Image (cartoon, rainbow, N blue to C red):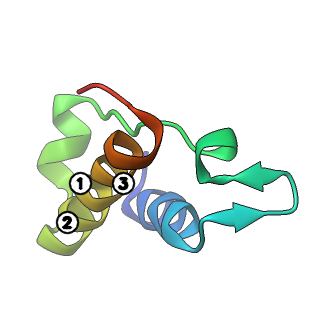
């Protein structure tokens, strides 16, 4: 997975809580990356991914 694609996925996931198809929990899922992909993340990308997963934990009951 390239950095640009990771950033696009994270930005899309964080763009809003409601979509035409439903709320955040209906359309989002936890982001889990391989160790290699995690090593390639910038600090900003890592923060965005963590924010996405924490939002899902809070709103949707996701488990780590």
Q: Position of residue 55 (x, y in %)?
A: 36, 54
Side of 41 relative to 3 (left or right): left
Query: Label 2 near label 3: C-beta < 8 Å?
Result: no
Rendering quarter of residue 31? top left
Separation of marks 3 and 1 at Cα, in angstroms: 8 Å
Q: Position of residue 13 (x, y in %)?
A: 54, 60
Front residue of 29 and 24: 24
In which quadrant will I find the N terminus? top left
Task: From the image, tell me which residue sits under label 1.
Answer: 50
Which mark lies nearer to you, 3 or 1?
3
Side of 25 relative to 31 (left or right): right
Query: Label 1 near label 2: C-beta < 8 Å?
Result: yes
Q: Which mark is residue 47?
A: 2
Separation of marks 3 and 2 at Cα, in angstroms: 12 Å
Count of numbered labels shown in the rendering: 3
Q: Can you say whether 12 is above or below 38 in the image?
A: below
Q: Can you say whether 11 is above or below 5 in the image?
A: below
Residue at horizontal 20 percent and vertical 58 percent from the top: 41
Q: Can you say whether 23 is above or below 31 in the image?
A: below
Q: Position of residue 40 (x, y in %)?
A: 19, 53
Front residue of 59 and 10: 59
**Label 3 vs 1, first from the N-terminus:** 1
Task: From the image, tell me which residue sits under label 3.
Answer: 55
Q: Secondary structure at mark 1?
A: helix
């Amino acid at each position: 997975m390239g950095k640009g694609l990771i950033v696009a996925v994270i930005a899309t996931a964080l763009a809003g809580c409601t979509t035409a198809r439903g709320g955040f929990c209906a359309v989002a899922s936890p982001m889990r990356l391989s160790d290699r992909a995690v090593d390639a993340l910038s600090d900003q990308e890592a923060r965005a991914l963590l924010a996405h997963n924490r939002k899902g934990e809070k709103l949707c009951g996701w488990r780590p």
